[in-house]
Image (tube, grey):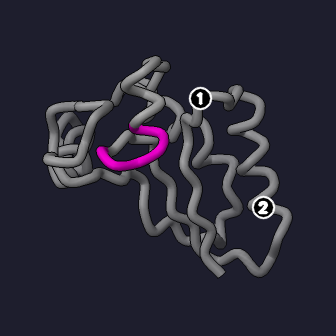
């Protein structure tokens, strides 16, 4: 079984986010996870709400810091299938990190 989790919903607290990992760990049938940050796209209900009243979204640095905090908490037998989700440029409202998916995946590896 695979769990797909979006981090950074407007009502989430840090404690809630950490709690998601503990919940995932509780279920032995979960073998895979897909994580990504909230991104706002054209044509979505959240896109309409965001345009009327913007709310805080992760910066790239904030999101990678979160990943560094939660990944060690994940059960070691769970396979991570995704860390980022990026929409098509023509649909993306926010956040615009100015990088495509492969650039984001390689960003921190290039610094080592």
Q: Residue at x 62, y 42 (%)?
A: 70
Q: Residue furthest right?
A: 26
> Local crowd at mark 1 within 10 Å, few (<14), some, or many (≥20)?
few
Task: Specify start and end residues of the magenta stretch as a single range.
Answer: 42-47
In percent of width and height, residue 67 lies at 51, 41
Q: Residue at x 77, y 30 (%)?
A: 15
The residue pinned by badge 1 equals 10
> Local crowd at mark 2 within 10 Å, few (<14), some, or many (≥20)?
some
In percent of width and height, residue 6 lies at 54, 49
Question: Quick check: 6 above or below 47?
Answer: below
In percent of width and height, residue 28 lies at 80, 76
The answer to whether residue 85 is left or right of residue 35 is left
The answer to whether residue 7 is left or right of residue 82 is right
- Quadrant occupied by the C terminus: top left
Q: Earlier in the sequence, mark 2 or mark 1?
A: 1
In percent of width and height, residue 51 lies at 37, 25
Question: Quick check: 59 above or below 81?
Answer: above
In this orientation, which residue lies closer to the viewer: 34 or 105? 34
Q: Tally the marks.
A: 2
When asked about the image quadrant of residue 97, the answer is top left
The residue pinned by badge 2 equals 25
In this orientation, which residue lies closer to the viewer: 96 or 51? 51
- Disc 2 and disc 1: Cα gap in Å? 24 Å
The answer to whether residue 103 is left or right of residue 75 is left
Q: Nearer the viewer, mark 2 or mark 1?
A: 1
The residue tagged with tag 1: helix, strand or loop?
loop
Q: Residue at x 41, y 35 (%)?
A: 48
The residue tagged with tag 2: helix, strand or loop?
helix
In this orientation, which residue lies closer to the viewer: 62 or 75? 62
Q: Residue at x 27, y 35 (%)?
A: 93
Would you say residue 91 sits in the magenta stretch?
A: no
The answer to whether residue 84 is left or right of residue 38 is left
């Amino acid at each position: 079984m695979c769990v797909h989790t979006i981090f950074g919903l407007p009502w989430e607290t840090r404690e809630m986010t950490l709690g998601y990992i503990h919940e995932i760990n509780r279920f032995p049938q979960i073998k895979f996870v897909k994580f990504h940050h909230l991104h706002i796209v054209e044509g979505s209900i959240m896109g309409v709400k965001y345009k009327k009243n913007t709310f805080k979204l992760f910066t790239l640095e904030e999101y990678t810091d979160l990943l560094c905090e939660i990944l060690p908490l994940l059960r070691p037998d769970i396979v991570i299938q995704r860390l980022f989700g990026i929409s098509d440029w023509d649909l993306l409202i926010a956040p615009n990190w100015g990088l495509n998916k492969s650039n984001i995946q390689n960003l921190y590896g290039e610094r080592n």
